[in-house]
Image: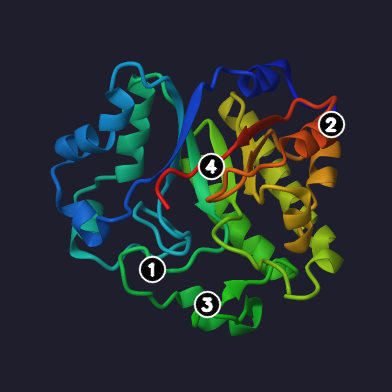
Amino acid sequence: MKGQLSSAHIDAINRRRRVIVNFDVISADGARFATKEIERLVEWKFMFADEPGTHIDSIYWSWGEGHQAPYPSKVLPLYDSPGFKKWADDGIDIVQVFLEAAKQRGIESFFSYRINGSDNDLGPVAEIPMKEAHPDWLIHLWNANGYWNFALEEVHEYKLSIIREAAEDYDFDVIELDFSRVCPVLPPGHQWEYRDRLTDFIRATRAMLQEVAHKRGRPLLLAARIPENLEGCHFDGIDPETWARDELLDIFVMGCRSFDVDISAFCRITEGTNIKLYPCIDDHH
């Protein structure tokens, strides 16, 4: 991928991002989120971004744990909640509503996808049909539902179908893969041995997004939220050195619930590339 990025793509990488907010937009509201009037909901959820002097240029929209959807989907089941079902029946696509509201404000929009979420979007942990159908695709640890095993090609194909749908159906500026929700994504005790399988997934995601970008006629960036240092990445089977060397993505977001980010190490591995680095400061947890 290195050397194959268009000038428009590089311009998109280099756009100004003074403050980026990762917004868990449904969190704390659960099923009540879909009971509010659309106009008031937008006004409420954009209140922080509309405050004068915030310098917020970009928002990472996190639409749940990644295995159910608050939006129309042919891949994921819709949230099992009356409000979300009514929106679907009425033809209301809440993701599109928020995307358009962000564009009106000149705010860059990321679709932040939790690569291995916990299935508790609306409060109680829900049964996920795909997990019920394919228990052999899962890693079983503390979560009764299990976590996806990215050593398997079948998991790659399934996850790519989810990401492709979001990329094709919505005019997002960036797709982010959020590895903070959650690891492990590879067999425990063997994560680094399987690192190339995870890199294969990143490479396939990049190629797919470039295809979507070509069809729509404008760039579509790829970001990844990863641990705050290289040791943490390697423990989870994440190989940022290779991802950076081959420029398989455009943005690294480093850290989760930590102020201690090894910025110098990430500067070293991305030297000579177009990749942007954004340390994460969590002011909530």
**Mark 2 or 1 closer to N-term?**
2
* Relative to 195, 257 lies left or right: left
Q: Nearer the viewer, residue 69 or 256?
A: 256
Which label sits in the foreground, 3 or 1? 1
Looking at the rendered image, the quarter that the N terminus falls into is: top right
**What is the spatial separation of the Cα atoms under label 4 and label 1, in whole angstroms?**
24 Å
The residue to which callout 3 is attached is 131
**Mark 4 or 1 closer to N-term?**
1
**What is the spatial separation of the Cα atoms under label 4 and label 3, in whole angstroms?**
23 Å
**Mark 2 or 3 closer to N-term?**
2
**Could you say whether the residue bearing mark 3 is in a helix, strand or loop?**
helix
- The residue carrying pointer 3 sits among few (fewer than 14), some (14 to 19) or many (20 or more) residues within 10 Å by Cα, namely some
Residue 74 x %, y %: 44, 58
Residue at (41% x, 78% y) in the render: 127
- Tell me the kind of residue under disc 1: Asn
Are the two marked residues, 2 and 3, in contact with CB atoms closer than 8 angstroms? no
Residue 72: which numbered mark, if any? Answer: none
- Tell me the kind of residue under disc 3: Lys
**What is the spatial separation of the Cα atoms under label 2 and label 3, in whole angstroms?**
36 Å
The residue to which callout 4 is attached is 167
Vertical placement of residue 165 versus 185, above or below: above
Which label sits in the foreground, 2 or 1? 1
Residue 152 x %, y %: 73, 70
The residue to which callout 1 is attached is 120
**What is the spatial separation of the Cα atoms under label 2 and label 1, in whole angstroms?**
38 Å
Are the two marked residues, 3 and 1, in contact with CB atoms closer than 8 angstroms? no
Residue 46 x %, y %: 28, 32
The residue to which callout 2 is attached is 2
**Could you say whether the residue bearing mark 2 is in a helix, strand or loop?**
loop
* Relative to 42, 233 lies left or right: right
**Mark 3 or 1 closer to N-term?**
1
